[in-house]
Image (cartoon, rainbow, N blue to C red):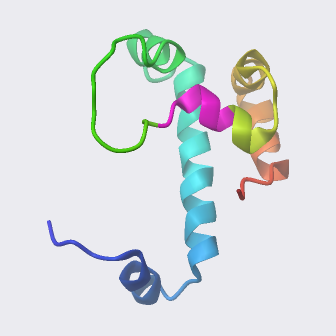
Amino acid sequence: MDKVTNEEVKRKMNVERDVLLERIRRRRFQYLGHVLRGSAGEELKNLVMVEGTHKVKTRGRKRAKWTQTAKEITGERKFANIKEIAEDRDKWKEFLKNANLQW
């Protein structure tokens, strides 16, 4: 419940900030592969695929979409290519191993 800055987390973990962000991106993509394979259930898979269909005004910057973020980080033009790779767990693991997930 306490608010902790990124710098404090970095200091407590004794890692550089870039390493921490790399771990976050990697885990996020591991979860995305899990969802796209349907392992988390069809409802969650459909939610990721059709996100942003309802219009709710929020304050601040626009929310990042899974599909757009995945395309930007991987350099793929089509999300369908990412989804196809994710459907085979071994291909996905190899893809993540070779991917440069730094922005």
Percent position (x, y) of residue 88?
74, 23
Where residue 1 sits, quadrant-wise, is: bottom left
Confirm whether residue 93 shows in the render.
no
Q: Quadrant of the C terminus?
A: bottom right
Q: How many marks?
A: 0
Q: Residue 29 vs residue 83: left or right? A: left
In this image, 70 relative to 84: left or right? Answer: left
**Residue 66 screen position, x and y as percent:** 54, 31
Which picture quadrant has residue 86? Answer: top right
Residue 103 can be seen, yes or no: yes
Q: State left or right for residue 79 relative to residue 17.
A: right
Magenta stretch prevailing secondary structure: helix
Q: Which residues are magenta?
A: 64-70
Asked whether 68 falls inside the magenta stretch, the response is: yes
Find residue 67 and report its horizontal and vertical position in percent: 60, 26
In depth, the one of 4 and 44 nearer the eye is 4
Residue 5, magenta (yes or no): no
Residue at the (37%, 84%) spot, across then down: 8
Q: Nearer the viewer, residue 26 or 72?
A: 72
Q: Relative to residue 55, is residue 29 drawn left or right?
A: right
